[in-house]
Amino acid sequence: MKTLYKVQGSQFRIELLETPKMQEFIETHADALNSGFQQVKMSDAMRQRLQRSNYIFSGMKTFHELNEAFPSLIDENGNRKPFEQFLNDVQRIDRTYNQNYLRAEYNFCQASADMAAKWEGFMQDGNRYNLQYRTQRDKKVRPEHAALDRVTLPMSDPFWQEYYPPNGWNCRCTVVQVRKSKYPVTPHDEAMALGEEATGKDTKGIFHFNPGIEKKTIPDYNPYTIKRCRDCDIAKGKLKLAFVPDNEVCAACELLHRCAGDNEKSATAIERTHYLHEMEPLLQIRHEKPIDEGTIKVGFSTYGNKHLFSDTFGRSRVLLKEDLKDLGAILENSTYIDDSALTHPRADNIEHFYYYKAELHGRTVRLNVAKEVKHRDSGHIVIKYYLYSINDINE
């Protein structure tokens, strides 16, 4: 509040949101929301998207909080109030936003993150199982949510795009996989009608979203945004160079998305440098691995290591950044599966792939070894084999 008090004038300016002190305030609020799913297992890509969602939400909340607080700087005569009087006047605003609202927001973000992580797991199996809505079946369950208990549908049914939990503030509902032979499928129209009844009081449509599909803890249209945010490219993370906001909410949203992008680029660059440095000893490793025609000597390359680091952001849910430095041992203990030639030329001189499988964290992953062929001007041909990428095997 001391930072706010020092600002000249009584009118809030959007640019204040990008000052170091305000960014620190926003990030502290976002960190509080992020703490709710620190121990939840999910891919790094999903975690990064959910944390970005919390940052944008925290920034928009701060925007509204500051808009309410600024008029308290000036008394009825147009003079700046003493700090103690200003602080007393804005404490009500602070209690409203950071005590009354924060608990419900924290619980919702935690529930969304839990369900997003579950959705990632469901994606591994696709429609192999059906999904079933479950309540806690206790006295706290809302009657309209109780009506959804045991609704069973394939994962591909549009119902899960609209009525996947959480379906309200402090909602404790969940979804589980069930064998198709064990429970009958609920008629689609019946399920949709029950879902509409369960969220009928949701005039903004806040609870008509799937955090796993959208990769967000809170949908774009929420208590701190406006209706047009549902379909806005800025809210979807698609920044336009020529975007000219026509209201303060849009201006704040655009600024916060740019700040989020800058923060992520900076943090990712630091993290990337750290893990690639840890992987440098791998460049000295070579393992003789079998193929159909005999054996090849497989190692690592700077180019391949960069791609392997990227794999931890989405290609594999099993491979963790902490595993990267140990890939030499994982490669050594892998077993040969198959190989394949390319169907079209690549710009990076890779002409062939050899596939191996290995165990990692109790799961099976596939190691993709590239054959790189470089033709020198002298006519000399240089061939290298190196680990290029890793992806999960669903068994």
Image (cartoon, helix red, strand yellow):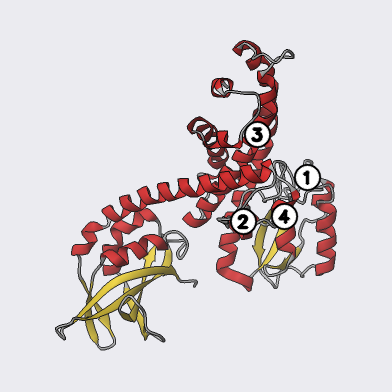
Closer to viewer: mark 3 or mark 4 = 3
Closer to viewer: mark 3 or mark 2 = 2
User: Alpha-carbon distance for marks 3 and 1?
Assistant: 22 Å
- Relative image position of residue 362 (x, y in whole percent): 42, 62
- Relative image position of residue 58 (x, y in whole percent): 60, 39
Give the quadrant of residue 214.
bottom right
Residue matched to label 1: 141
Neighbor class of circle 3 (other Cα within 10 Å; few <14, some 14-19, many 20+) is: some
Neighbor class of circle 1 (other Cα within 10 Å; few <14, some 14-19, many 20+) is: some
- Relative image position of residue 20 (x, y in whole percent): 48, 33
Q: Which of the two discs, 1 and 2, labels the residue nearer the N terminus?
A: 1
Nearer to me, 301 or 109: 301
Give the quadrant of residue 360.
bottom left
SS category of the residue bearing label 2: loop
Residue matched to label 3: 102
Q: In this view, does 110 lie to the left or right of 342?
A: right
Residue matched to label 4: 134
